[in-house]
Amino acid sequence: MPHVLVLNASYEPLGVVPLRRALVLVLENKAVCLEESGAYLHSATVTVPAPSVVRLKRFVRVPYRGPFH
């Protein structure tokens, strides 16, 4: 299964998630698709472009880990 880059609201990279998780974030209106992969996902009634980069709508604070963790 393809993976999607997830960016914070500040465009800081947070990580990579499976395509299914990224699509759920977009459909639940928690993220915005910035770049499409060119593929399409089909359901019985809807065709949705598959994202390759998504940006979260709300800022997520990432805890700082020291240099020796």
Image: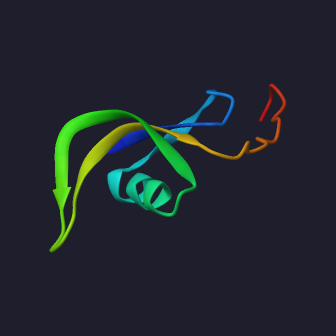
20 is higher (above) or lower (below) than 3: below
Front-most of 37 and 27? Answer: 27
- The number of callouts visible is 0
How did the renderer colour the structure?
A: rainbow
* Farthest bottom residue in view: 44
Horizontal relation, residue 8 to residue 32: left or right: right
Q: Is residue 47 left or right of residue 54?
A: left
User: In this orientation, does residue 52 appear?
Assistant: yes
- 7 is higher (above) or lower (below) than 40: above
Q: Residue at x 30, y 35 (%)?
A: 36
- Report x, y in % for residue 11: 62, 27
- Seen at 27% across and 46% down, the residue is 50
User: In the rendering, at what x and y percent does residue 44 appear?
Assistant: 15, 74
Residue 33 image-quadrant placement: top left
Position of residue 47 measured from the top left corner of the image (x, y, whole percent): 19, 58
User: Residue at horizontal 77%, vertical 36%?
Assistant: 69
Residue 5 coordinates in the image, percent (x, y): 45, 36
